[in-house]
Structure formats: C-alpha cells, structure tokens
Amino acid sequence: MADVINFAHRGASAYCPENTMAAFVKAIELGATGIETDVQMTKDGQLVLIHDEQLQRTTGSPKLVKDATLEEIKQMDAGSWFGPEFHGERIPTLAELLELVSGTQTLVNIELKNGVVLYPGLEEAVIAEIRRFGLSDQAVISSFNHYSLVKCKLLAPEIRTGILYMEGLYEPWEYAAGIKADALHAYFYAVLPEWVEQAAAKGIVYHPFTVNDSVTMRRLVEAGVAGIITDYPDRLASILREAEE
Ligand code: G3P
Ligand code: MG
C-alpha cells in the first residue's frame, strides 16, 4: 500500500493554479510522488502544459494554444485567475517540468491533450523530450486518444502508457493488453476490487482519477490500485501514511 503512487492532478491544483510550476513544486512539498499534467503544442511546435485547448480560462486570452507562439504564451499570466498571490505564474513547457523532476524519484504522468485539437507530431515530440532528459522510467503517457497511445508504444516501447476513459468498459484489461498499454486511467467510479485483481493477473495496473475525498481514496487503496490521481496530494499522503502504520 505504501507504494501507491500519489499523482497530483495538474500539480497540487486544489492549492495553486493548475499546471504551473507553483502547483508542481507544491505537490512535491505535500507528498506527491507523481505529477499529472496535460500537454499541448504551440503554433511554433513547442510543448506546453495546459488543460484547455483555449487560453481563456486560465490566462484571459481568447486564443487557442495551437494559434499562439511560445513567446506569446510566455507573456501570459496563468496565476491571477486563481489568486492574486499567483500573479505572474507562467504556462510551463514540458521541459521545465522534466527539469524539476530530473534527478528525483518523482514520476510524471503526461496526458496528451489531443482529443479536440489534433497536434501532428505531438507523440514524437513528447517522447523526444522524455528521452532527452533520460526519464523514460519515470514517465507514463496517457490519453483519451487511444490511437496516440498505440503510436507511442510503437515509437517508444520502454515508456509506459495509460488508457484514459470515463465509461464502465467491459474487461478493460483485455483491451489494455491488446494495445500493449500498461495502466488503466479510469474515472474512479469505474473501478471495483475484483477488476483490479483481474487486471493485475494480466499485468495491468489501475491509476484512477480524479479522487478528492478520503473515503474513496481509502476504498481504492484497499482495492489495490497502483496509483491515484488527485487534486489533494496531502490527503492521499496522509491516508498512505495511515495504511503503513
Ligand atoms: O489524467 C487524469 C485527468 O487529468 C483526465 O482528465 O480533463 O482532468 O485532463 P482531465
Ligand atoms: Mg489531465
């Protein structure tokens, strides 16, 4: 149980503006052992960490990520929407996050955000960055776009992949094995203890998202999941400490 990965969803997004360096640093301070983030591509082909396809909600810019250059994006304030004390936080590049975890044990769950906007070359670019930092063992690539996961596995068999889904899929571990994925990133309702066991028999682990209440966290830890994705890594850290005692 102690080894359950505590993935901070978009960093410690309950306490800091999501997908900023402040949120990632805070996550580690609060006991996260992994960081989940969302990656997209700028107009000039740079990898940036942001959830929405449009910059509006977190920066106030009406532009789409795909239509803005990195230079433009780096001028935007991605912190003030959350609180004045975060004024001046920037949208990070993937490289900035990889630099932060480089030389540590912290895992990174990089979610390819290519469901609405398709970014040609996104898979290749993300894999190249992971390899450039020598972090293949510390990375899990996930996506709701399962074609992308198949592509990633073909390009980089050494990097783990996680299937994101919301539905109550039938025997998803069979599907996972079929596309050579390593993990099921299931919406947390779609996880029962017997399924965790059956998946494990196939070598497939569960990393459910996004679990913020302690009761569900405990239930999933007891069910034997390998990791949990949460906005509150402090809550999960304390449950994992209890479980160790
Ligand atoms: O990776 C888990 C979770 O982040 C998937 O949904 O919309 O928060 O990126 P979303
Ligand atoms: Mg995500």
Image: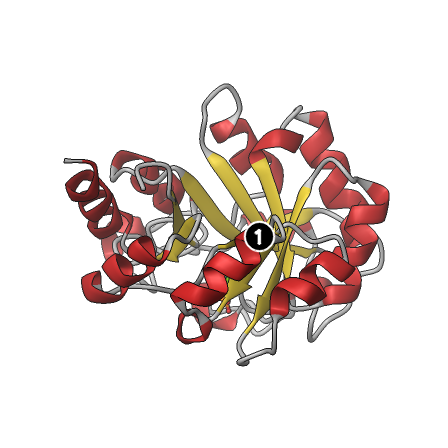
Q: Determine the secondary structure under disc 1.
A: helix
Q: Is residue 203 above or below residue 163?
A: above
Q: Give the residue displayed 49% in from the left and 36% down from the top.
A: 107
Q: Quadrant of residue 2?
A: top left
Residue 129 picture location, percent across and down: 71, 35
Residue in front for this viewpoint, 59 or 220: 220
Residue in front for this viewpoint, 1 or 16: 1
Q: Which quarter of the rendering shows the N terminus?
A: top left
Dot 1 alpha-carbon crowd within 10 angstroms: few under 14, some 14 to 19, many 20 or more:
few
Q: Is residue 214 above or below residue 129?
A: below
Is residue 231 visible in the rendered image? The answer is: no
Q: Is mark 1 within 8 Å of ligand 1?
A: no
Is residue 95 visible in the rendered image? The answer is: yes
The extreme top residue here reads 103
- Colouring: secondary structure
Q: Which quarter of the rendering shows the C terminus?
A: top left
Q: Is residue 23 left or right of residue 43?
A: left
Residue corresponding to mark 1: 201
Residue in front for this viewpoint, 242 or 71: 242
Q: Give the residue displayed 62% in from the left and 69% down from the top.
A: 172
Q: Quadrant of residue 58?
A: bottom left
**Which amino acid type is marked by label 1?**
Ala
Residue 158 picture location, percent across and down: 73, 35
Q: Is residue 5 left or right of residue 186?
A: left
